[in-house]
Amino acid sequence: MNRQFLLDKRPLGRDLEYTDFKLVDSDVPSPGDGEVLVQVMYLGVDPAMKGWMENRADYVAPLEIGDLMRGNGIGRVIESNHEKFPVGAVVSGGFGWQEYAVSDGKNIPLNPVPEGVPPTAPLSVLGITGLTAYFGFLEVGLPKEGDVVLISGAAGATGSVVGQLAKLKGCSKVVGIAGSKEKCDFLVNELGFDAAINYREEDQAARVKELCPDGIDVFFDNVGGEILDIALENISDNARVVICGGISRYNLAGDIPGPKNYFNLVFRRARMEGFIVLDYAPRFGEAIAYLAKHVAAGDIIAKETVMEGFEQMPNALMALFAGENIGKQLVHIAD
Amino acid sequence: MNRQFLLDKRPLGRDLEYTDFKLVDSDVPSPGDGEVLVQVMYLGVDPAMKGWMENRADYVAPLEIGDLMRGNGIGRVIESNHEKFPVGAVVSGGFGWQEYAVSDGKNIPLNPVPEGVPPTAPLSVLGITGLTAYFGFLEVGLPKEGDVVLISGAAGATGSVVGQLAKLKGCSKVVGIAGSKEKCDFLVNELGFDAAINYREEDQAARVKELCPDGIDVFFDNVGGEILDIALENISDNARVVICGGISRYNLAGDIPGPKNYFNLVFRRARMEGFIVLDYAPRFGEAIAYLAKHVAAGDIIAKETVMEGFEQMPNALMALFAGENIGKQLVHIAD
């Protein structure tokens, strides 16, 4: 049987629940001419999925109630009628939340896993979250040598890559904000951040001022809300505020307050800018090559948190919003 | 006698009052060697002056209680010990709120009024408000041919120039927001705006949607508050939101809400950016030459509203916040 999770309810303005998804059984599909059958080994989850479920994001095709949940995975070809993808090949693709997928290489584009990186890297550092870090930080954040960089959601799949890119690009101080001592220790001791702030236990506003006394040159925001206001209060002249996500906002209903300190953009002649990583699709190859090289060299650590078992998919997505993951949240489905 | 207005109280978080200024008499100063005595003919007022009075803006030297109010004027040299500025020369300079000023050309830099423009042009279209329009719109707003441009505070000294620059640059639709039918008629009939919205009588949100159905490419904001949120809701992909001012906010106390729709910057991969016109000082010459050429050619109309009499200075500044002016608010002091 092929287990699948379908969208059952839209979690608009509230926390996700397991029952927003419907677990169904269907037959394992048979590959036709020119097709392969892939057994999914890992699936990744991403905060943007909640937006898709809510049908809020207009830059992706709508996800309807009853549709297979969308998502990227890594799988192994177990039947093949396609010469490019023999049985045993490990490939990444947009398989959706299911255990088996059929692809002709076009309806679900299949990509071989690059050499020298962990097989799950295409779901994390070489996947959408790593590409988001790459283009958001480098193309929107425009870091310069010597910059002071602040990152919210720094222990997440994107934030953790942003901080490592900042060090590679010669930024002088990289400060991450995360929600536990374990995460903060990880950022400083394993990823090479210069400092980390545990927002659950420390006074974020005081610590940001203390750690960035000359101001923040690039703020990379995955969180929104209070930390965005704190950062805006502490930007330096010509700062770049990159709006990547707003996970603190995704579960709120009604009118969610905006950043009251936005006017400091004037006094500091600074910029706040959003982006959609898919706009950079023509340049994904360049980014993947750069990131893969640095992962292979050990300059970038692709941290992952893995849950076990297909039925954990909803819990894995919920874990993101509870801040339980370090690095990319994956679910291991089959060997 | 030389009448002067000194700062007497800081109007922080409240409306300006006449008694925030102290009118004093002093002797008319005598010019020394290398100095001239200027009789001030016109003074201009600008919303930023309230920020100076509050000591809120950190990009200008603080204005202390008892200091002469700062401001630019046009005057005539009536005594001269400086060969470059003979008696009778009309000059612009930062004379402050007083009827007579002494300058050696350095403590208050003096500039001759360019040929072919009205003598008050250095206070309006060739002064800080015109320069603000020039650099804010062209360098931060980055208009392209065919762009849809929305301007709040469009009948003010800066907004009215932005709209005319937009037409000169080939923007396809220029919409201004202003506070009276008279102002809206002026924008459309005299300045060549494509449309205007009277925010006191019309439903701004509905009208913006109606007039900009394909989205706003450049929003030039002098007002802040509700209109900023409306604009953010209606930006097009890759839009530029130029934060020039926030006159709706200047009289409010406490925590003033930020733009709740800021996250649309992500969905629309757009940018919100502030600027300080003084940062462009090295390029003022280029801007003044461009603007003077177009004023002389009649392509840019430098509209002014003039009050009569030095004692009106506080009222002129208050009139800005009441939205009474069209174009630059000036005070006529002497012929």
Image: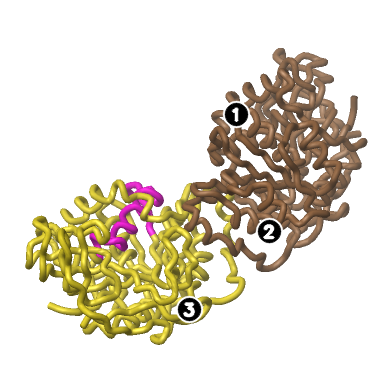
Chain colours: A yellow, B brown
Chain part drawn in magenta? A124-149
Badge 3 is on which residue? A11
Residue pictured at 68% horizontal, 59% vertical: B225
Residue A205 image point, x, y percent: 49, 70
Identify the image quadrant of residue A61: bottom left
In what quadrant of the picture does the N terminus of chain A appear?
A: bottom left
Question: Which chain hosts label 3?
Answer: A
Q: Is residue A128 magenta?
A: yes
Q: Is residue B329 magenta?
A: no
Residue B155 image point, x, y percent: 77, 41
Identify the image quadrant of residue B289: top right
Point out the frontmost of discs 2 and 3: 3
Above or below — where is A178 with respect to B329? below
Residue farthest along the front direction in this orientation: A33
Crowding at label 2, few (<14), some or many (≥20) Cα neighbours within 10 Å? some
Observer-nearest residue: B242 or A261?
A: B242
Helix, strand, or loop for circle 1? helix
Badge 1 is on which residue? B284
Amino acid type, callout 1: Phe
Observer-nearest residue: A11 or B257?
A: A11
Question: Which chain hosts label 1?
Answer: B
- B13 displayed left or right of A153: right
Q: CA distance from mark 1 to mark 3?
A: 53 Å
Q: Earlier in the sequence, mark 2 or mark 1?
A: 2
Above or below — where is A235 with respect to B113? below
Residue B225 is labelled as 2
Residue pictured at 33% horizontal, 83% vertical: A315
- B150 displayed left or right of B116: left
Amino acid type, callout 3: Pro
Do callouts 1 and 3 point to residues on the same chain?
Answer: no
